[in-house]
Amino acid sequence: MPFLGQDWRSPGWSWTKTEHGWKRIVFYGHDLEDNNREIDLNVLCSSNKENLFQCDVGDVCDLPTTKRKKDFYNNNTKSQFVFTDKWIYVQKGSTKERHGYCTLGEALNRLDFSSAIQDLRRFNYVAKLFQLIARSQLTSLSGAAQKNYFNILEKIVRKVLEDHYNPRLVKELLQDLSSTLHSLTVHVGRCVLVGNVNIWLCRLETILNWQQQLNNLQIPKQISNGMSLSDLPLHTQNKILYKLSDAYDIINLGQATPTLHILSENRILWKKLCHFHFSDKQFCKNLVLTKSDNVDWKLMYFTLQKHYPVKEQYGDTLHFCKHCSILFWKDLHLALLFKDCGHPCTANDPDSLMPISPQHFIDLFKF
């Protein structure tokens, strides 16, 4: 029996007749898509759901623990709306055609970050973006965006544990997120968090568990009968070191063999690394000399790193179209086959596309 809702354009609500009267039927999550089942709202709110967290006979289960499990279950239910587009219109004001504005949480939900972390070219970009959100923008996200944030973060940690890809970056991400959550739950107060504080305590425990797993991660040695890195000529090993833009990668690679250690301490290598990340004006303010009045370029790099940000390099980034104000993942396969960059633009002007750094991504949604 259909009834009109608050909006006259809506098709109305679905109702069913029971012994106690008419009750509204609610379609919840992905159950409608999977099994085409109808779930009653009163059934969800009844005491039967509490049985999901009841302990067996003989177990001792206190009330706070059971309540935290219920809150964690309620927070991790599937979202009702799933977006498959890889682009979003960035709107900062109301127009005749569009009303409202785009938020950081909406961009986090609409852009396909779950598929992006499976691409090695985009993994570091997404991890760095999530680290910046963890430092300062976590409280600005909506409840659905926070849920999506932690779901994608779980996939990032799982990928590192399975593929052993860049665990150092994810450790820094979890450390910043743990510090932020500890500050919000203990020092700042509960009013700035969306949802029950027990949900955040469960998330904090999960983050600590992830940190322990990453700290105990041991990368197995791969036994290969072919040529190894140490079998390459010296000039080839030296070229590999010159291709690295991260100082910690150079130091870690130098610990592999004594030959690589000697090559990683080369002054010219660290000099080029300093010139790549910093400008000449920054050198003059923080000049580091040795006893023989020579520049210690390795110490110079870490001194400049404390005062200035380093240049970021990513295999692939989000792009912003200045013509149509759309933020999107650039699809290289479509660009080669159909001359389509992956967003509905009418200009088809490659000069209007601009790569977006993680910090610039956050700045787009600051009003």
Image (cartoon, helix red, strand yellow):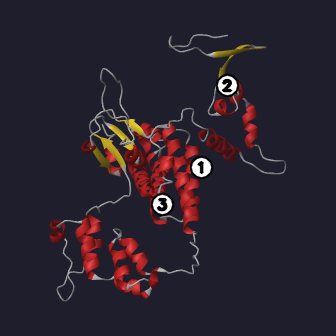
Q: Where is residue 259, by image quadrant?
A: bottom left
Q: Amino acid at mark 3?
A: Val
Instruction: Please identify the quadrant where the C terminus is shown.
Output: top left
- Work out whether mark 3 precedes mark 1 in sequence or the reverse, and give the earlier one: 3
Counting from the top left corner in percent of width and height, residue 263 is at 35, 83
Q: Amino acid at mark 1?
A: Cys
Separation of disc 3 and disc 1 at Cα?
20 Å
Separation of disc 3 and disc 2 at Cα?
40 Å
- Graded by Cα atoms within 10 Å as few (under 14), some (14 to 19) or many (20 or more), the crowding at tag 1 reads some
Which residue occupies 46% across, 66% down? 168
**What residue sits right under mark 1 in the picture?**
202
Q: Amino acid at mark 2?
A: Leu
Which residue occupies 69% across, 30% down? 44
Label 3: element kind: helix
Q: Nearer the viewer, residue 15 or 243?
A: 243
- Please indicate whether residue 216 sits to the left or right of residue 135 in the image: right
**What residue sits right under mark 3 in the picture?**
170
Label 2: element kind: helix
Counting from the top left corner in percent of width and height, residue 62 is at 72, 47
**What residue sits right under mark 2 in the picture?**
41
- Asked whether residue 67 is in view, the answer is yes
Q: Nearer the viewer, residue 226 or 254?
A: 226
Label 1: element kind: helix
- Please indicate whether residue 298 sits to the left or right of residue 9 in the image: left
